[in-house]
Every structure is written in C-alpha cells, then in structure tokens.
C-alpha cells in the first residue's frame, strides 16, 4: 500500500504537534522496516524555506515531497481560497492519505483518508484563542472531520467531544494514545545539571511547568498559587515558547521576579534533564486533548500535580494529585503537599513511573498501522 503522510507539522513546529508527528511517524517507519509490512510512504510537507531537520526519517520505503511554500500559504490556497488542487498532484497517486494535524488537504475521490484531531479547545474555550484563528478552525476542522474516512482522537475525552460537538458517528472515531520516548527516564546523564545551570541559569531548586504560553495553560493562576507558598528558595520555572494572548502571563511573572522564571522554548534535547531536575511538575491546564508533559515528567521520576479535567484524569490515572484548575488555593495546597510530604512523594513517583510505562510510541505505531490497513 502507498500511504501519503502530511509531515508539515514535524518540520514547521518544534514542539506540540510537531513533536507528536516526528515521534509517531518515526515509530511507524521503524515498525514497517522491522516487520516487513510492505507499505510505501510519501512524506508530504509545505516546508517553505526551512532546512530539513536532522532527524528526518530516511528509509528505502520512504519518499519525500516538500513544497517550497510555507504551511501558512498552503492553508491560504487550500482552505481559504479553496483551490481544489488534490495533494496527489504533488505526492503522486496514494491509496491513503493521513494527516496528523487536524486538517485534510484536498484529495482525489478514490483516496481513503485518515485524520488525527488532538482536541477541540477552539470550540470549548474560544476566548482562549485569537478570534481569527477560531474562525479558521471552526471552518476547516469540522469539514475535515466530516470528509475523513476515519478519525483518530488523542483520548476518550477528545473522542467524546468529537461525537458531542461535531456530531461525528461514534464508529468513525478511534482513540490513539501518544507515547513516551525512552529518553525520558529518572537516570541523569553525566553533566546535565551543569548544562542546565549554564544554559538556563537554574541554580536553585525549582517547580516546573511545560507548555506554550497561552491562556489555556492557566499560567497566571499557577504563578499566583505558587506565590502563596512559603518562600523556601525554590523558583517556579515555566518552559514554553510564546503562543498567543500571553501578555498577562508575563505581567504576572514580573510581579514575582525572584520566584518565577519564564525560560521560553526549550530544545527537545534539554527536556529530559529539565524534568529530572525539578522537585515537582505542575500542569494546571483548563483543557487538554492528551497532556503528554504529565507522562514525560512521571517517566523522569517527578511527582505531578495536574488539573482533574478533560483528558488529564484519563492520562494521569491514580499517579498524580488532581486539582480544579479554577481553584487557586486548592492548587497551592496540592503543590505544598506534594513538596513537603516525603511519603506521598515516593508513592507518587513509583505510581508515575508505572503509569508512564504504559504509553509507548511503538504501541501507538502498531495501532496506527492497523488504522492505515
């Protein structure tokens, strides 16, 4: 079978869906080679002027098809101007086209389609987005879901949203969980603490949160909740690039210059060490389609406090302290408990490692291969 895969996010986005696409597609290609599945793949991307990433999958079964226009221009042509140019004009004929990033390009009538929808936050919390982005997503995502032959959701919570909010037939939607890469583990690499100190100035104990700066991540409330804790020398470290509507986060952080650090985007290679160095990981998001940082922190042996909403209870299981993301005092209390109660910390660490071990990219790739069949 010849399968086309939209690899644009993997090239254009360093975090989030970009990393999801790199990990999942990489695992799929390794599985194909190991088991001789007989599939051929064309990785399609609107790459613009970006250079090829060093970890781009390379295999005799893989062909690359990169357009010299950006993903923004591709979206304008296909989804705003609605030019009916099928993706097969660029990839050549394919039996199935898979998009791991919410939206399908035009395809020929005989091509089967598979689509991943990570979440419907733009429908659940539209005020957490720039209005222009909400209008775009409201138009193209439901249309792509309706057109797809099969839809993959990141969690049961997202599957329920697809059924309830978009009227998607239940039999059309399957849950495919993300995985945790093996590099997220408790054992520290030689010299990593010194590297963190040199690169990011992290010379004090810290509580960590990871994710793009945007309203949905609830960072303003996290900063206020952390500020309620006694000052024991720890700092709150937030690692994530600037997304949108993030000004209030920066303003709140500026009110606590000695206790809050905004690192900006952190390269993938530094993430495991950043997790391992933390005393606690906190993820108070209002809504998540999956919440991979929760599992990555657990895999690194770090206790976790996270919201008890959307997909997060499903992902964290009994290995985290769950809190109401609206409850600033409750969030502060849970952080204090997880930092001070050593017996609880040990229990959370053991449960967290066991929980994270249940999610692997190989398992995700096997399920994806079945969905592609």
Image (cartoon, helix red, strand yellow):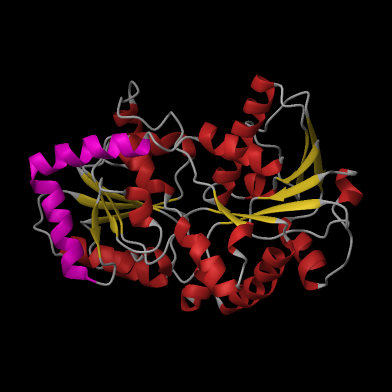
Instruction: Please tell me which residue lies in front, 156 or 132.
Output: 156
Q: Position of residue 216 (x, y in %)?
A: 42, 67
Number of numbered callouts drawn: 0
Residue sitting at x 43%, y 29%: 183
Q: Position of residue 223 (x, y in %)?
A: 26, 63
Quadrant in the picture for residue 172: bottom right
Q: Give the quadrant of the C terminus.
A: top right
Q: Taking 310 as reference, is 134 above or below it?
A: below
Instruction: Please tell me which residue lies in front, 236 or 181.
Output: 181
Could you tell me if residue 46 is visible in this image? no
Side of 54 where 313 appears, left or right: left
Side of 138 where 236 appears, left or right: left
Q: Does residue 301 belong to the magenta stretch?
A: no
Residue sitting at x 31%, y 25%: 188
Question: Which SS type dominates the magenta stretch?
Answer: helix
Residue sitting at x 44%, y 65%: 214
Which residues make up the magenta segment? 327-356
Q: Does residue 351 belong to the magenta stretch?
A: yes
Q: Position of residue 289 (x, y in %)?
A: 47, 58
Q: Position of residue 145 (x, y in %)?
A: 67, 64
Q: Give the quadrant of the N terminus.
A: top right
Q: Taking 205 as reference, is 36 above or below it?
A: above
Instruction: Please tell me which residue lies in front, 137 or 77.
Output: 137
Could you tell me if residue 349 is visible in this image? yes
Side of 8 where 239 appears, left or right: left
Quadrant in the picture for residue 327: bottom left
Q: Taking 23 as reference, is 237 above or below it?
A: below
């Amino acid at each position: 079978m010849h399968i086309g895969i939209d690899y644009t996010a993997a090239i254009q986005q360093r975090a989030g869906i970009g990393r999801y696409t790199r990990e999942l597609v990489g695992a799929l290609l390794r599985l194909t080679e190991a088991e001789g599945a007989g599939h051929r793949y064309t990785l399609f991307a609107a790459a613009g002027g970006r250079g090829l990433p060093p970890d781009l999958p390379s295999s005799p079964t893989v062909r690359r098809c990169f357009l010299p226009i950006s993903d923004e221009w591709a979206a304008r042509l296909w989804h705003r101007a609605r030019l009916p140019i099928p993706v097969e004009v660029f990839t050549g004929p394919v039996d199935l086209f898979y998009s791991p990033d919410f939206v399908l390009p035009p395809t020929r009538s005989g091509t089967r389609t598979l689509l991943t929808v990570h979440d419907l936050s733009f429908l659940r919390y539209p005020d957490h987005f720039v209005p222009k982005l909400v209008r775009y997503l409201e138009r193209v995502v439901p249309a792509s879901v309706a057109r797809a032959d099969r839809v993959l959701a990141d969690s049961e919570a997202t599957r329920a949203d697809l059924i309830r909010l978009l009227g998607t037939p239940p039999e059309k939607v399957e849950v495919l969980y993300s995985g945790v890469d093996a590099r997220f583990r408790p054992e520290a690499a030689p010299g990593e603490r010194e590297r963190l100190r040199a690169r990011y100035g992290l010379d004090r104990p810290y509580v960590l949160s990871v994710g793009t700066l945007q309203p949905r991540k609830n960072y303003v409330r996290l900063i206020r909740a952390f500020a309620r804790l006694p000052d024991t020398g720890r700092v709150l470290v937030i690692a994530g690039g600037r997304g949108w509507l993030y000004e209030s986060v920066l303003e709140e952080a500026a009110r606590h210059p000695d206790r809050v650090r905004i690192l900006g985007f952190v390269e993938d290679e530094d993430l495991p060490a950043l997790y391992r160095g933390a005393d606690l990981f906190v993820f108070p998001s209002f809504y998540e389609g999956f919440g991979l940082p929760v599992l990555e922190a657990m895999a690194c042996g770090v206790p976790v406090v996270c919201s008890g909403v959307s997909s997060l209870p499903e992902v964290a299981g009994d290995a985290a302290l769950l809190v109401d993301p609206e409850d600033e005092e409750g969030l502060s209390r849970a952080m204090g408990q997880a930092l001070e109660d050593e017996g609880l910390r040990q229990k959370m660490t053991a449960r967290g490692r066991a929980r994270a071990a249940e999610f692997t990219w190989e398992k995700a790739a096997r399920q994806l291969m079945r969905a592609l069949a």
